[in-house]
Structures are given as C-alpha cells and as structure tokens.
Amino acid sequence: MPGDRYDLVVIGAGPGGYVAAIRAAQLGMRVACVEKDPALGGTCLNVGCIPSKALLDSSELYHQAGHGLAAHGVKVGALELDLAAMMARKDRVVRGLTQGVASLFKKNKVARVEGAARVAGAGRVVVAGRNGEQTLEAARVLIASGSEPAPLRSLPFDGERIVSSTEALSLQQVPERMLVIGAGAVGLELGSVWSRLGTAVTVVEILDRILPGMDRGMAAQLQRALERQGLTFRLETEARSAARTARGVRVTLAAKGSTAEVEADVVL
C-alpha cells in the first residue's frame, strides 16, 4: 500500500531511534518508527536512566532527612517512608517524558507503529502487532533496537528474588538485605537507592575495583563515599551459584581460592 512506504523506517524508539526519527522528519523525510513496547523512550526513559535518577533524587531526600539535616540545625520528628508514593512519583516522571516523545512524534509527523519488527529483505520491514502483520517499505532502514538485561547462567532471573534492574526499580517493599552482583553504574546506582532507604547492601565485583571502565582515582573516591553511606564491597569475588531459601536467596561466592555463602532477600 502507498501509505506504508517511507523514506526511513526506524526500528526502536529509544534515545537513538526516536531522536533519529524526529530529526529525519524535520529534514523532510517520511518516517515511521517501530517500537514493540507500548511506551516510547526505550530502556533509558522507561526502565533505566530516568527512573533510576528519580529514585536517586527521592532516596537522597529521605536519607538527608534522617542523617544529614541535624548538622544544619534542622530537627525531624518520626521519619516515615511511603515507598508507594515514591514509586508513584517515579512513574509520573517517566510518564511525562514518554508522553513528551509521543507529542514530538505527532508534531513532526513521525508515524508510530507498535509491534516487533524484522527486516524481511532490502527495504522491507515486517511488523508483528496486535492485529497481525504489516509490511513497511522504505528507502532506508535504521536499526536502533537497544538492549535488555542479560542474566548470569548461574543466577537466572526469577523476577522476584533474583531480579534485573527493571524489577529493582519497582520493588514493592524495602528489602532487609540486598546482594548486588556487579559494581558498574547500574549496580551502584540501585544499590545506593536501596541503601538510603534502609537496606543492607553488599556489592560483589569480580575485578579488583568498582567502575572498571572509569578513572581509578574517581572510582576509589566513590567507593569511599558509598561505604560511608553503608554499602559493603567484596572485590575480586565471583558469584558462583544461587539457591532459593525460605526467606530469600543463598549465594555462593568464590574469592582467592575459598568459597563462602551469603544470604539476601533480593539479588540484583
């Protein structure tokens, strides 16, 4: 059908895809953007950078109220956490931004196509949606399909006790103990959030430092700051296996030729 022919079809509506789609439309192209999830924005806006920063902001305020304000002469009475309200604020922030992307699509006349896309040949993209398949024809196809959390073979996600960052952004209660496997940006951000809210957080990293891709001095300074906040680090340590228990998860850790078992309510 003529209506399904475009100058450009973008697969994926994350920060790479939606920006490219909007800019191409502004330059005069007829553009369609295919996204399999109901909300635009990809991982970053929905289950990544934006919700994590919203929770970092909220948890910092809670932590300051309980630990930092007294030094400024501000006395706080009985401090109470309303986790549901905190999560609701996070969701509002996310919703506002994803709706903003949808508005930009409409303003710039980018056709939004919901479904899972596959390239079926030169200039042909087949989209499987709720109402079956449709074929889009395009002079050019841009693939910006993004990424998703990858489980460890020895610790597959169950969405409840062994979770990815997606579930860790939406826990319904504050866990007593959390084991974070991996001292990269995601693990440290979410570990910091839950530590501020009262969780005893232990971070396991197989290398000899946190944030392996960053400047060593900066990483060491951040580790000291996080330790002051209450996080515990076990470096040069590997998570070998995990088993569900009545209360949570028992994880076997290996370090320098020896093994040890630790228990947590949630493993990230």
Image (spheres, rainbow, N blue to C red):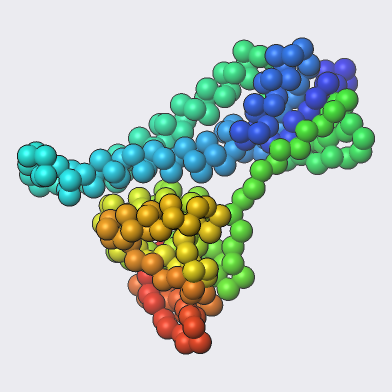
Image location (x, y in percent) of residue 31 = 76, 21
- Tell whether 217 sits left or right of 8: left
- Residue lying furthest front: 217
Against 113, is 213 above or below?
below
Residue sitting nearer the eye, 251 or 133: 251
Residue in view at x 78 percent, y 33 percent: 142
Q: Is residue 103 visible?
A: yes
Against 139, is 245 above or below?
below
Image location (x, y in percent) of residue 192 = 36, 53
Residue in view at x 33 percent, y 58 percent: 224
Against 215, is 207 above or below?
below
Image location (x, y in percent) of residue 167 = 47, 53
Residue sitting nearer the eye, 157 or 218: 218
Quadrant in the rendering for residue 9 = top right
- Residue lying furthest right: 122
Quadrant in the rendering for residue 135 = top right
Quadrant in the picture for the N terminus: top right
- Tell whether 49 sits left or right of 247: right
- Tell whether 195 sits left or right of 49: left
Residue in view at x 46 percent, y 26 percent: 96
Quadrant in the rendering for residue 180 = bottom left
Residue in view at x 32 percent, y 54 percent: 225
Image location (x, y in percent) of residue 47 = 51, 43
- Tell whether 189 sits left or right of 15: left
